[in-house]
Image: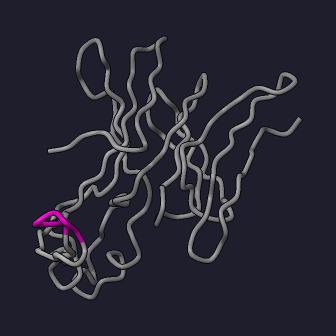
């Protein structure tokens, strides 16, 4: 199963490409009867996500960006949304395994410009803004930020100059807006 969530997608009307962020992760829901918490007979309760000694049950990539040609229905390209999470990269069961980047099961918000697709890794991801060639998905730049991108980036023009703005935060850094532009 699957579907779109908060991060949505980006569309290029000139090329007919739709850029979609997705993730692969397990989730477990449970129902509990707690009359003191609700007048409804059953409400959602807590449940632990099953793992194998801390490793996910699903195969990577855990987070990806896919460019879909809406005319042909084919995938133009697909790439991971970031590096491998440290808890997987450094897991003792994977010692000696040459693991390619797996991406992160986070919500990657995107914004599209004339030639580039920008995306963050979302809450829990690395504090980076990725810039990729919108035609190929190849990395053009990775821009360090003060914290993880937590909202959808936006772009605007001011006095002939293009800016990209995004909300960033993490458990060590309060929420703030970061604006980026090319040097004048």
| Image coloring type | one colour
> Looking at the image, which residue is at 56% across and 40% down?
118
157 lies left or right of 46 = right
Q: How many marks?
A: 0
**Where is residue 17 shown, x and y percent of the image?**
39, 21
Which residue lies most toward the bottom here?
Answer: 92
Q: Determine whether 102 is above or below 157 in the image.
A: below
> Looking at the image, which residue is at 40% across and 37% down?
8
Q: Is residue 43 magenta?
A: yes
120 lies left or right of 103 = right
Q: Determine whether 153 is above or below 76 in the image.
A: below
Q: Determine whether 84 is above or below 87 in the image.
A: above
**Where is residue 154 shown, x and y percent of the image?**
62, 36
Looking at the picture, tell me which residue is in the foreground, 152 or 114: 152
87 lies left or right of 13 = left
137 lies left or right of 26 = right
Q: Quadrant of the N terminus?
A: top left
Looking at the picture, tell me which residue is in the foreground, 9 or 76: 9
Q: Is residue 151 magenta?
A: no
Residue 3, quarter of the rendered image: top left
**Where is residue 99 shown, x and y percent of the image?**
30, 67
> Looking at the image, which residue is at 25% across and 74% down?
37
| Magenta span | 38-44
- The secondary structure that dominates the magenta segment is loop
**Where is residue 94 shown, x and y percent of the image?**
24, 80
């Amino acid at each position: 199963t699957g579907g779109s969530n908060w991060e949505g997608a980006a569309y290029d009307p000139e090329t007919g490409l739709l850029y979609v962020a997705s993730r692969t992760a397990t989730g477990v829901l449970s129902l509990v009867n707690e009359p003191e918490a609700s007048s409804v007979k059953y409400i959602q309760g807590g449940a632990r996500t099953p793992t194998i000694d801390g490793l996910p049950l699903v195969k990577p990539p855990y987070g990806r960006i896919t460019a879909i040609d809406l005319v042909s229905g084919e995938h133009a390209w697909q790439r991971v949304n970031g590096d491998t999470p440290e808890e997987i990269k450094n897991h003792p069961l994977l010692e000696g395994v040459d693991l390619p980047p797996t991406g992160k099961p986070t919500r990657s918000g995107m914004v599209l410009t004339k030639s580039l697709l920008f995306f963050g890794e979302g809450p829990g991801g690395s504090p980076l803004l990725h810039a990729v060639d919108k035609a190929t998905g190849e990395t053009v730049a990775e821009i360090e930020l003060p914290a993880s991108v937590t909202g959808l980036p936006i772009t605007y023009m001011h006095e002939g100059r293009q800016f990209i703005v995004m909300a960033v935060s993490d458990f060590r850094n309060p929420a703030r807006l970061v604006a980026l532009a090319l040097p004048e």
